[in-house]
Image (cartoon, helix red, strand yellow):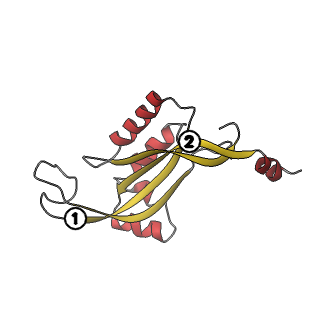
């Protein structure tokens, strides 16, 4: 039996926390992402700190023998700040649309709620928005039985 077969036979559905982060990106970085070039994201002033935070914490994207597991996709965000908002982009009372990226990663169920809160706080601190959109939900992922 080769390594691939032994890995597949050792997989099962494991509970984990899915962490999804929505972040603005420059038009150039966004277009490069859509073309398959993620290197521009590493230089984007809004996105680079987020990636640095993800890599600084071993809990993000740890699935069995893999580390730094995350998916990046492109999208658009639309929002209308009210008069109390201090938006990084846009103007109060006017609807804005911006290019954005969506980063999805996972945190093992064995990470405590307190540690998960610290991890999310670190992401929020590295995010350019006044109100970062960060989702955390429990999911089941196919992973080694030791996750």
- Residue toward you, 89 or 109: 109
Distance from disc 1 to disc 2, alpha carbons, whole Å, reads 34 Å
Residue at image point 54% right, 47% down? 139
Q: Is residue 62 visible?
A: no
Read off the residue under disc 1: 96
Q: Position of residue 64 (x, y in %)?
A: 67, 42
Residue 2, above or below 147: below
Read off the residue under disc 2: 16
* 65 displayed left or right of 98: right
Query: Which label belongs to residue 6?
Result: none
Label 1: few (<14), some or many (≥20) within 10 Å? some
| Circles 1 and 2 in contact, beta carbons < 8 Å | no
Asked which quadrant contains residue 96, the reply is bottom left
Q: Position of residue 121 (x, y in %)?
A: 37, 36
Q: Secondary structure at mark 2?
A: strand
Residue that protrudes farthest toward the left in the picture? 83
* 14 displayed left or right of 23: right
Residue at image point 36% right, 61% down? 100
Residue that protrudes farthest toward the right in the picture? 1
**Foreground disc of the pair 1, 2:** 2
Asked which quadrant contains residue 94, the reply is bottom left
Rendered-image quadrant of the C terminus: top right
* 102 displayed left or right of 24: right
Residue 70, above or below 147: below
Residue at image point 24% right, 46% down? 130
Q: Secondary structure at mark 1?
A: strand
- Residue toward you, 16 or 100: 16
Q: Is residue 23 visible?
A: yes
Label 2: few (<14), some or many (≥20) within 10 Å? many
Q: Position of residue 25 (x, y in %)?
A: 35, 60
Residue 114, above or below 87: above
């Amino acid at each position: 039996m080769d390594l691939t077969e032994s890995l597949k036979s050792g997989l099962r559905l494991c509970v984990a926390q899915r962490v999804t982060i929505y972040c603005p990106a420059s038009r150039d970085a966004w277009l490069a992402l859509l073309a398959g070039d993620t290197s521009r994201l590493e230089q984007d002033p809004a996105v680079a700190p987020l990636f640095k935070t993800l890599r600084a914490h071993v809990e993000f994207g740890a699935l069995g023998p893999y580390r730094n597991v995350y998916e990046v996709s492109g999208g658009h965000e639309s929002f209308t700040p009210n008069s109390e908002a201090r938006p990084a982009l846009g103007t109060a009372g006017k609807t804005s649309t911006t290019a954005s990226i969506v980063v999805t990663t996972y945190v093992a169920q064995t990470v405590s709620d307190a540690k998960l809160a610290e991890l999310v706080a670190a992401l929020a601190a590295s995010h350019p928005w006044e109100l970062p959109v960060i989702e955390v939900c429990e999911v089941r992922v196919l992973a080694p039985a030791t996750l």
